[in-house]
Amino acid sequence: MLLEYTNRKGSKHYLRAAKTKKGNTRYYIVKNLSKFSKNELQRAMPEGYEFYESPDDARVSIRKIITPLFSIKEKEIVDKYMKKHDFIYDYIIELEKEVLIIYSAHMTREEFPELSEKYFLLNQSYTPQLVFTQKDGKYTVHRRCHLGSFPDWIPLESSPELENLAKKFTYHIGKESLLQFWIEGEKDW
């Protein structure tokens, strides 16, 4: 049986192996099985690798397995506070190597009731809203910066307790009030 991965949009993805000019093996994600021979398609994942689905657009790739800095328990703490907000209709919490990121959905079913479920899923995308980092026993929450002259992420507040930051800042996701927070320790412009 071929190794298969189905993303949240319902697209099936397969793993293809091809030899490079130097004789090494290179792996690719493919969707159309008819273009490749059965010998090229894999039945098992190479050791140390995994399928990865991008939170923002559900693009599938293969990557080395990462060990995230944040634990599943820390992800569950953030998720607990996200679930308390009924105005946040759809979100993804992603554990990356060094950060925990909250993505929120662009569309709701209520906004587009005329779309079929399949078409809705195909067009749904997610935007990163908050990033949590961890250094020297302190957590820091960051929000996106929408000014071209500043870095992508603005640090808002630090705390030794992740729960305090999650409780305070998840409430503001998708609201203009999130933009009221400025760089920690600096004067507002």
Image (tube, helix red, strand yellow):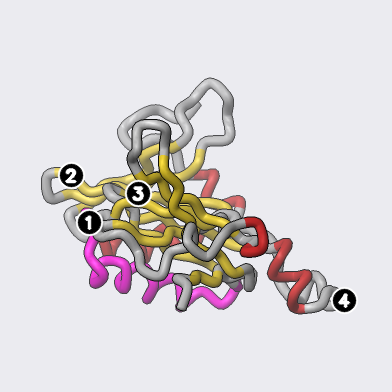
| Residue that carries the numbered disc 2 in the rendered image | 135
Q: Residue furthest top?
A: 149
Q: Is residue 151 above or below residue 23?
A: above
Name which of mark 4 and mark 1 comes first in the sequence.
1
Res. 135 in view: yes
Circles 3 and 2, Cβ within 8 Å, touching? The answer is no
Choose between 137 and 171: the one closer to the eye: 137
| Residue that carries the numbered disc 3 in the rendered image | 141
Question: Which stretch is magenta?
Answer: 68-89
Circle 4 crowding by C-alpha within 10 Å: few under 14, some 14–19, many from 20: few
Q: Secondary structure at mark 2?
A: strand
Residue at mark 4 to residue at mark 1: CA–CA distance = 42 Å
Choose between 42 and 180: the one closer to the eye: 42
Q: Secondary structure at mark 4?
A: loop
**Of labels 3 and 4, the one closer to you:** 4
| Residue that carries the numbered disc 4 in the rendered image | 114
Residue at mark 2 to residue at mark 4: CA–CA distance = 46 Å
Name which of mark 2 and mark 4 comes first in the sequence.
4
Residue at mark 3 to residue at mark 2: CA–CA distance = 12 Å
Residue 150 relative to residue 109: left or right: left
Res. 88 in view: no
